[in-house]
Image: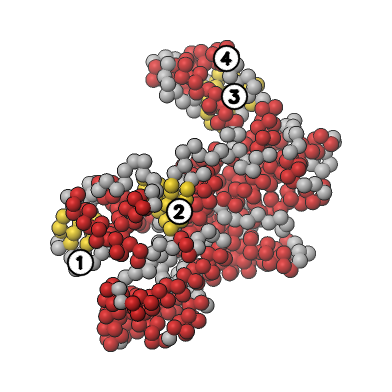
Amino acid sequence: MSDPVTVVSDRLRPVFAEVSGRADADPVVRPSDRADAQANGALALAKQVGTNPRELAERIVTRLDETGVLADVCSGVEIAGPGFLNLTFHDHFLARELSSVASDPRLGVVPVASPRTAVVDYSAPNVAKEMHVGHLRSTVIGDALVRMLEFAGHRVIRENHIGDWGRPFGMLIEHLLDIGEDAAAEGLSQGDLDGFYKAANAKFAADEGFQERARERVVLLQAGDAVTHELWDRLVAMSTAYFNTVYRQLGVLLTDHDIVGESVYQPLMAGTIERLEASGLLTESDGAKVVFPPGFTNREGDPLPLIIQARTGGFNYATSDLTCVIDRVERLGADLLLYVVGAPQQQHLQMVFEVATMAGWLQPPAEAVHVSFGNVLGADRKMLRSRSGEAVKLVELLDEAVERAAAAVDEKNPDLPDAQRSEVARMIGIGAVKYADLSNDRIKDYVFDWDRMLSFDGNTAPYLQYAHARIRSIFRRAGADPIAAAAAPIMLDEPHERTLAKRLLAYPSVLDDTLSSYSPHKLCTYLFEVAQDFTAFYEHCPVLRADHETVRVSRLALCAVTAGTIAHGLGLLGIDAPEQM
């Protein structure tokens, strides 16, 4: 672990424990504006052991002097206020740690000691329905978490729980037969999923004969009729092929291998009900089979049921979701289930998790987490819609992002070769859309603003991408290899060098914090701060025109670590870092 705050915390913990007599003593070390770091733990600890916090802090400092545990890390430890410890790091300690990071492809991030098996449920479009802007958040948040979990050392299983089952498929299959598979394939391959679905739905509403055929087709589908299943397979395949074009354009990791649709769990649901009945949790309410998890009530204060089987005998989302839990824990061996699903599903998922816990299927160390998120809003602060009032198609939004980025690139660097300009425009446009989403606290709504997200100023992907490209241009002008430059000795003689070094060394802790809360915006904020600190460093500390060669080489090393950190962090967010812009 390279983060100086973590290093100091680890060294202080046994001293705090020894002086206080409490094995669980936490020094509570945080970055500070008053010094490099501040340990605040003496205040709470003094209250626990019944002593004066400043006196306890004095005893801790005395013991630190006696043991010398911080001698090679801190140049100063001072008591402030009622018992805070202000800590100043040795410059040579920071330089040593940064040199270690510079030669480490993991940038100081140590793989977790106890890897988990995590299933991440995200994206989840519906067959024969267009992916729209509502799918954006689930897809990019889920993808970023997958990348970070994998980098941390966990075993990650991606599950794209597509909607590929249910009554609508009767009318969809019949419509497929009416227009012919070739015509349907041509339309769906061009992204006209909404048109296909709407035409089928309109026909169902207007034609009683079509209604009857659709209902009969549902029966055949559920009964396992071979011909019907073949048509259903074809419909699913045409839809997923188009989903894949969106995923490729968006630059996410999902593939056909990750698709685990609702249909997969249909044969298993009867077993789920049998297990609930055997556990004594299932009861009847208004003809339906339900479970009443404690703590959930309706507006009148009556217990709220989770409906497992409708009075008609049909299964529903709760049945499917409980079956998912069983499958993921028992078959896949998962001990972490992440559901990257919109906030409106919060109560439903909480009830599912509670019932799964009551049934014994979700027991420690296994846990399920709802990674909820807010909505994407338009300028009117209402749900983002197209001019026609419909949901914005995701593929059209991505196309527009690349077009707008191309115009920005033309203006900023008109001399780029055409092929390179096109690729850079793709990186900037897609990156801008993803970063605008990820940089906002996921639990909040955010306003979709083209001008802001494509700006080269502020906390945006183009700003970070340009910072990376600018650093890479330094090496081109110097005729230097960034990898070789990173191996050079680092000196921290100027305040801005020191500030940048401390920021870069915080990368492992930032990733820990980001993953512990499943909040990608924390990594975004950090990368923005790195870019800002680099800008200040570059303005105040000449690199190529440094006074001495040793200083020039040291600053090139700082540049190399900075570029590597920005590119790596953007990569964990699923965003490309151009070499030139």
Horizontal arrangement in the rendering, residue 542 relative to residue 168 (left or right): right
Question: Callout 1 environment at 10 Å: few (<14), some (14 to 19), or many (20+)?
Answer: few
Tell me which amino acid carries mark 3.
Answer: Leu
Q: Compared to 151, does 184 lie above or below? A: below
- In the rendering, at what x and y percent does residue 70 appear? 60, 21
Tell me which amino acid carries mark 4.
Answer: Thr
Quote the CA–CA distance across marks 1 and 4. 72 Å
Q: Are marks 2 and 1 in contact (CB under 8 Å)?
A: no
Q: Are marks 4 and 2 in contact (CB under 8 Å)?
A: no
Residue under numbered circle 1: 313
Residue under numbered circle 3: 87
Residue situated in front as seen by the camera: 486 or 226: 226
Quote the CA–CA distance across marks 4 and 2. 47 Å
Q: Compared to 506, does 479 lie above or below? A: below
What secondary structure is found at the residue carrying circle 1?
loop
Quarter of the image for residue 160 reads bottom left
